[in-house]
Image: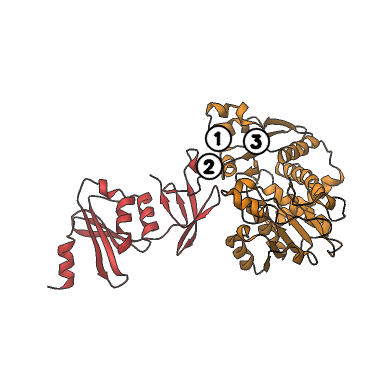
Chain colours: A orange, B red
Amino acid sequence: MANLKGKNLISITDYTKEEYLQILELASEFEKQPKQPILSDKVVASIFFEPSTRTRLSFESAANMLGARVIGFSNPAATSLQKGESLHDTIQMVSSYSDLIVMRHPRDGAARYASEVASVPVINAGDGANQHPTQCMLDLYSIQKTQGGLDNLNITMVGDLKYGRTVHSLVQAMCNFNATFHFVSPEELKMPSSVKMHIKNMGLEYYQYTNLEDVIPFSDIIYMTRIQRERFSDPLEYERVKDCYILDAATLKGCKPTMKVLHPLPRVNEIATDVDKTPYAYYFQQAQNGVYVRQALMAAILGVK
Amino acid sequence: MSNERKKELVVSAIDNGTVIDHIPANEIYKVVKILNLDQYNDEVLIGTNLSSKKFGKKGIIKVKNKFFEETEVNKISLVAPNATLIVIKDYEVVEKIQLNIPQEIKKIVKCINPNCITNIEEIETYFKVVDKEPLKLQCHYCEKTMTNIRFEE
């Protein structure tokens, strides 16, 4: 078993397949018993340089359930950054106050830089449009848990496949498990060629569709994404594509009985609320799984598991 | 008069300094710019569209009393990866260096991603060479890849 003590998690490629699986196994232990005071002598710094509700609360909940003390900020306007302090100095200061740093930052690459400055390990909770590795890990955990394993699955991704960092990371991770990919998107938001090239280089297959109904019968996972208004410079183009894929209970007729719908949340209208009551909806449990995965990561990185 | 003799007349020899040979003819002014040779105070001889067995047409730059440092050599290798550096002392060739694109590039290149942390804070840039032909770099920080190389001012 790999020793993850002191290891940063900045990008999904920082960890090997074996290390992922180790975290997922540990997460399932925490799911059985989430409240364990194993980090009661630790201080976790949760520093969010841009607003985030779900990720921050999930990390802080995970740390609290393990008995750690949490310090930090969720609003950089109220910190010395407002006075012009550099990221370098902030990180150096915070690392002397804590055993582990969880950080979100609006700039791409900020987390990697912070990990080079900090004297304690850093977990990236999202750096601009670049990486959000714990989201990817909780997606893997949710897939493994609902499908009984990660190998040989038909993974369907729907919506904004061009800009969504979540789907790009998930493709990269699922390439380790012999997945077949199905991409449903409007022409303007197709999966980037670099991601498709990666799939081909791994000797795997992908298929592209514009019609959501086509993929329902054979998908093991349908991963829905939100089409983000802020990605479009032309508001007319956004209006044209924003409602192009709406998954409702009727659309799901004829799907595999074990199929699950995932979504990184928040959703707007791409999943109709009538799906919530079907056995296929899994997005809220998926968010809950994030707590166990983050517990597993913190415990492993702090060397107590 | 032989072609070889004509070339010597066009680009005369230097007593001390460095000759950058085998520069692709269309990249010659880029090399001048990245090395700031337009600001250089001593003699600089520039020859372009000279015939070359290897490239068809080549460029050559001779810089008097200049011995390039590693960062400058790396810069040249990114623009003219097949160039040769010839170090001359007292009219004698003392060293011939065949350029190579390094695996990693520090400091000299600027990330093209405006949202990259290296363009916000004062951080030394760091790129990995993903592909040599055509040249493709990946930023160590924001992880974006780029083929359009921009140098730090």
Secondary structure type for disc 2? helix
The circle drawn on residue B117 is: 2
Local secondary structure at mark 1? helix
Q: Residues within 10 Å of mark 1 (few under 14, many from 20)?
A: many
Pick the front one: A100 or B36: B36
| Above or below: residue B62 compared with residue A111 | below
In the image, which disc is placed on residue A87? 1
Looking at the image, can residue A77 be seen? yes
Percent across and percent down for residue A262 are 77, 53
Q: In the picture, residue A215 is in which quadrant?
A: bottom right
Question: How many numbered tags mark residues here?
Answer: 3
- Quarter of the rendering containing residue B14: bottom left
Q: CA distance from mark 3 to mark 1?
A: 12 Å
Q: How many neighbours does mark 3 have within 10 angstroms: few (below 14), some (14-19), or many (20 or more)? A: many
In the picture of the structure, the residue carrying the numbered disc 3 is: A48
Q: Is the C-beta separation of discs 2 and 1 under 8 Å?
A: yes
> Answer yes or no: do the residues labelled 3 and 1 have beta carbons within 8 Å?
no
